[in-house]
Amino acid sequence: MSTNTLPDIKTSFPEWYQEVIVQADLVDTSPTRGCFIIKPNGYAVWEGIQRILDEKIKQEGVENAYFPLLIPEEFLRREEKHIEGFAPEVAVVTHAGGKSLEEAYVIRPTSETIIYDAFSRWIKSWRDLPLKVNQWANVVRWEMRTRAFLRTTEFLWQEGHTAHATYEEARAMSLTMLEHYRQLAEEYLAIPVVIGEKTPYERFPGADTTFTFEGLMQDGKALQMGTSHILSQSFPASFGVRFQAQDGTLQSPFCTSWGATTRLIGALIMTHGDQQGLIMPPRIAPTQVVIVPIFKSDEEKVNTVAAAQKIATELRAAGVRVVIDADEHKTPGAKFYHWEARGVPVRMEIGPKDITAQHVVLVNRMEQDKTKKKTFAGFGNVVQDVNVLLESIQKALFDKAKERRNSQWHQADKLSEFGAKLDADNGMFQVGWCGGQLCELELKAVKGTIRCLLNENKHKSCFNCTSPSSRDILIAKCY
Amino acid sequence: MSTNTLPDIKTSFPEWYQEVIVQADLVDTSPTRGCFIIKPNGYAVWEGIQRILDEKIKQEGVENAYFPLLIPEEFLRREEKHIEGFAPEVAVVTHAGGKSLEEAYVIRPTSETIIYDAFSRWIKSWRDLPLKVNQWANVVRWEMRTRAFLRTTEFLWQEGHTAHATYEEARAMSLTMLEHYRQLAEEYLAIPVVIGEKTPYERFPGADTTFTFEGLMQDGKALQMGTSHILSQSFPASFGVRFQAQDGTLQSPFCTSWGATTRLIGALIMTHGDQQGLIMPPRIAPTQVVIVPIFKSDEEKVNTVAAAQKIATELRAAGVRVVIDADEHKTPGAKFYHWEARGVPVRMEIGPKDITAQHVVLVNRMEQDKTKKKTFAGFGNVVQDVNVLLESIQKALFDKAKERRNSQWHQADKLSEFGAKLDADNGMFQVGWCGGQLCELELKAVKGTIRCLLNENKHKSCFNCTSPSSRDILIAKCY
């Protein structure tokens, strides 16, 4: 295991990804088509994301609830665009309790339909609004091409659903959650994101507006990291959701839905990994510091392990997540490799000479410059120095990712100019667009897609047909 | 709503239960057969249980992971007893992605099979043991007679699965988790439980030993609140789980599994509710204190709400979960009723006279004696007095439930003597048993079941056949 090397991250990024998640022990394959087992090392990252996001969700007055996994198949048909979008992807339960069912159920691909059915009972008057619920749940979408975390038949997510009396309120709610997602991505996962609006052809099936936040991975391809929608007013109406407004009229509410999934773990890996494996941003890292006592004799072992335990206790009291690796069956080198592959941001080494010198060695996982990679921390300063180092790694990871992203964010005018470069080198291209689907489809030739509409208007004409453009778009290849 | 009254808790307990969960806004019916929507008020209790239990689980070195929802149907067949037990209950996915599947999947009724398949890859040597994982997940069992929280087609739970090198270690693990469940039930949910072993005929399908913890509800019926199993050694073996022992031989590990579900919420309701509705034990109550400012004029409103907010801030800083109900569209009486039905253990009233007197009124939800129900707390003592009151309610709820349970725990010798009493009055009967299934089946006539085997031997002969008994059992009607 300690002699494995990863495929070259620059030339073989997909192979690198497939291998790094195995070496870091994040997932395992499963006997279920398109599904992966999320192993403890991977699930701990999801628990961290849940903790951060759940607090943000509750801060907005949204309450957690739980709705059934199985949805009557007929529900999906009530909203025309919704069934068009999801029919090819659903898993269907036709038998249960030893019998064939009279009415089939689909496993939720998303829960708007069953939640609007409940809203039709819960919402009667404007006094019942806004109504805001969220659920942490699993969903199933039968995907043909699957890849761990990025696209799987079953995935874990949160899905928030709110109903409001006015469009303005619904829009504000949708954008507020998008901003929370941005904060989660940038401040915790250290992934710089672009926020914007999807084109009409890329909207969620049944939405009037879909906002997205997108990251640019190390290979120059974009990843949609999550979305927030304003639903068409007819969607809740098709489930009989109506309320008596303050003026006495009967109206349909304006609804939002927004979700973030285990795909965020994939984004993390593809943004920060390097040739040695994962790099976990300290604020989300399940283990922030691994302490490796270095010993040869039994006496050295006793002393270095005791020192490690004392320091670990101090660090834990300060809220740092620490593991001690004192396994005597493995060499220090094998341990270094093991924890590097798992992306632990700081390694601390304590050998007999360090004890004599009353200091520890801190090794920065992301630093490539060998003269800066190792530093010493005096016994009295360990907690402070570790915290400073963790925060500096958090910042450096974000800065590095942002610099890379910016260097791959190009301004362009015409497809004939940038098309070949996109096709060959990936990256993002900010251009003008007439708003027409025909021009959007022209991007297929260079494997490009419109990632989102921006709130800028630097480019005055369409990248394809040269008609006037009132809003820039961002084009990239994508996952 | 404020004029609703509940069915009589003494004479119409099932109807009382059905109604109290609706009035307390815990659940709603759903269009999915046998499934209920867990509304925010109900889900908040589950979040509390998760928080407590997750910490206990991690304390034992068990790590959370996530395994697929869908299990190849063939997996269930590999263990004879397991398929016998679960075949009549599974929901089957036969179509997905618009096509008929070559191999059908069942929605997990429990995950031993797919987890042992993973264990067969993860466990090679004794060095890989013990292996301890848990998942928080939904499961589906197609139940014919459903009742919210107690028995539903889909339910939420945690399922822990561990593998060990020796039987002794597995047994210790299984009993350790049973002890954590007991603590959760008694120390947080304030439900006294009996812990014991299931008879061979009541074991989990595929287990050698099933431990249970059982509560006695207010109607004198027992409720199995959760179980912990030692699996038959052949179960993991049928998935090829083998390890090389320290002596070089190839062996099958000894496995445990243990689960607790949303049924615990039902146990809480049926243990502590009264004629006014729910009573939430303070340690698990999502809202521990509701503050109701009492006002008539606008000026009084401003003053009492300001005082309520100041006190709420102090209480929150001390970790108390507080809600202020300052709704001017509802009378104080309607609010009292509303929060009583929801089981909030302490109500605080602040009116203009209370502000003058520099105190608040504390109202104890569970106290029936009107002379003790209300007390005053000086502004300077609110935090301390509230905490003392909350802890005293926590203790009083447990003591009351235990006293009731003990008064319904009878010693008996012969079915001919206690049968009629069990049939008419419910309660638990501790008796001797020969260990034979024929005697166990005789209990059907009085709707009795053996809840568990105890570690006592007060009764020397079987309750039915009078053959010698080496271990007492507990008999009750059950949910």
Image: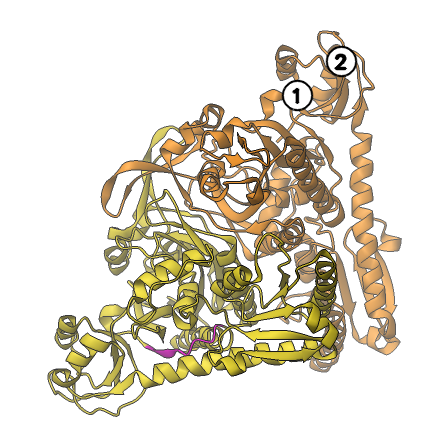
Chain colours: A yellow, B orange
Number of the label disc, if any, that sits on residue B232: none
* Residue type of the residue flagged with mark 2: Ser
Magenta-span inclusion, residue A316: no
| Residue named by callout 2 | B469
| Mark 2–mark 1 distance (CA, rounded to whole Å) | 19 Å
Mark 1 surroundings: few (<14), some (14-19) or many (≥20) residues within 10 A: many
B246 to A217, vertically: above or below: above
Q: Please state, as top left, top right, bottom left or bottom right, where the C terminus of chain A lies in the image.
A: bottom left
Residues in magenta? Answer: A189-196
> x, y (%) of residue B44?
60, 56
Name the foreground residue: B145 vs A460: A460
| Residue named by callout 1 | B448
A49 to B441, vertically: above or below: below
* Residue type of the residue flagged with mark 1: Gly
Residue drawn 40% across the image and 72% down it: A271
Report whether residue A13 is seen: yes
Q: Where, by quadrant of the figure, is residue A197 drawn?
A: bottom left
Q: How many marks?
A: 2
> x, y (%) of residue A443?
16, 74
> x, y (%) of residue A361?
63, 74
Name the foreground residue: A387 vs A232: A387
Q: Is mark 1 on a helix, strand or loop?
A: loop
Q: Where, by quadrant of the figure, is residue A185 drawn?
A: bottom left
Chain letter belonging to callout 2: B
In screen coordinates, is A429 left or right of B392?
Answer: left
Q: Is the magenta stretch mostly helix, strand or loop?
A: loop
Q: Where, by quadrant of the figure, is residue B273 drawn?
A: top right
In screen coordinates, is B329 left or right of A146?
Answer: right
Chain letter belonging to callout 1: B
Q: Is mark 2 on a helix, strand or loop?
A: loop
Report whether residue A234 is seen: no
